[in-house]
Image: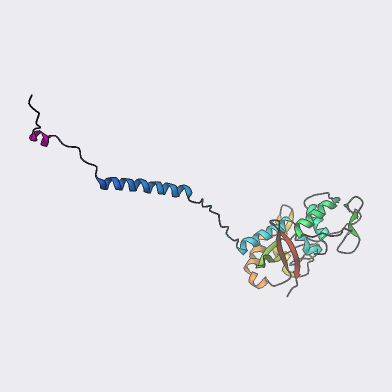
Amino acid sequence: MNEYVPNPMLQNIVKQPKKPNKLVIILSILVVVLLIIILILMMSKPRVVTTEVQRQESLDDIALELEYFIDENKLDALDAFGYDNLTWVAINKICYGINSCTQIQGDAVKKYINDVFDTEVTFSNVNCYLNDGPLYTYDSVNNVFVWNDTHAHGGLSTKPIYSKINSIKRNDGKFELVLNKLYYNPEQSDYITTDPLGINRVYNANDYMHTTEDGEDVNLTKLIADYDNNFDTLKNTGTRYKYIFGQKDGHYVLEEYEVISAE
């Protein structure tokens, strides 16, 4: 039998399998390793917690908040009753808008004074500003203030017809707010004044009266426009009211109050 001898021509026709390219293999390995490293880094990277930075309120914003606090807690009554009569201020707030408010619980008065002023007072009779007898008699046995039915005459205004911010300052975490106010009480004066007693005059009320469904009343639109337009001249005229507020448990408390005398 003859031995088979490969034909050189056929060997050239049939392609031999190519050997793998070493460079491609190395690059492939590097890519895989790089992907593994990236995956490990992503899994081990500490979680970044983004905290929202709170914008510090402007003094103008704070002044508006404090004005609302004063109005909401009826603190304008301090202008009429004084800082030494916090019980009266509390009763005025509790009875606001109530037609018949003849008995007020001492606990409600205590809570108001503690929440708004962060202080406590010793209860006693609430005497009239004219010193002609008690308005409310304090019953210590039942811890209740009882209205004196025999006491009847006109009272003081406990709410101005207009308030305007004079200044606002921040000092050591406390806020000093000064307000200008206009009061009108025909039982006290024919003038629009800067105090509830009708002493420090600003305008003649007759110049601002107009007819309403309930009769004659002050035209507030005209009054406010005139006062605002001349505020640079009037801002230090008459009495002004200074409040110093602190903060407790996330809310404001009134720490000091002062009536600034007319210049």
The residue nearer to you, when weighing 244 against 25, is 25
Colouring scheme, one of rainbow, by chain, secondary structure, one colour: rainbow
The residue nearer to you, when weighing 22 against 250, is 22
Asked if residue 116 can be seen in this view, the reply is yes
The residue nearer to you, when weighing 208 against 103, is 103
Rendered residue at 82%/55% (across/down): 110
Residue 64 in percent (x, y) is at 65, 60
Would residue 164 appear left or right of 257 to someone viewing this image? left
Rendered residue at 76%/69% (across/down): 259
Asked if residue 168 can be seen in this view, the reply is no
Rendered residue at 78%/55% (across/down): 112
Residue 248 in percent (x, y) is at 71, 58
Up the image or down, 6 lies above or below 32; here it is above
Residue 3 in percent (x, y) is at 9, 28
Q: How many marks?
A: 0
Q: Is residue 205 magenta?
A: no
Q: Is residue 9 magenta?
A: yes
Residue at the farthest front position: 1
Residue stretch in magenta: 7-14
The residue nearer to you, when weighing 89 against 202, is 89
Q: Main secondary structure of the magenta part?
A: helix
Rendered residue at 92%/51% (across/down): 141
Residue 232 is drawn in which quadrant? bottom right
Residue 81 in percent (x, y) is at 81, 63
Residue at the farthest bottom position: 263
Quadrant where the N terminus lies? top left
Quadrant where the C terminus lies? bottom right
Residue 210 is drawn in which quadrant? bottom right
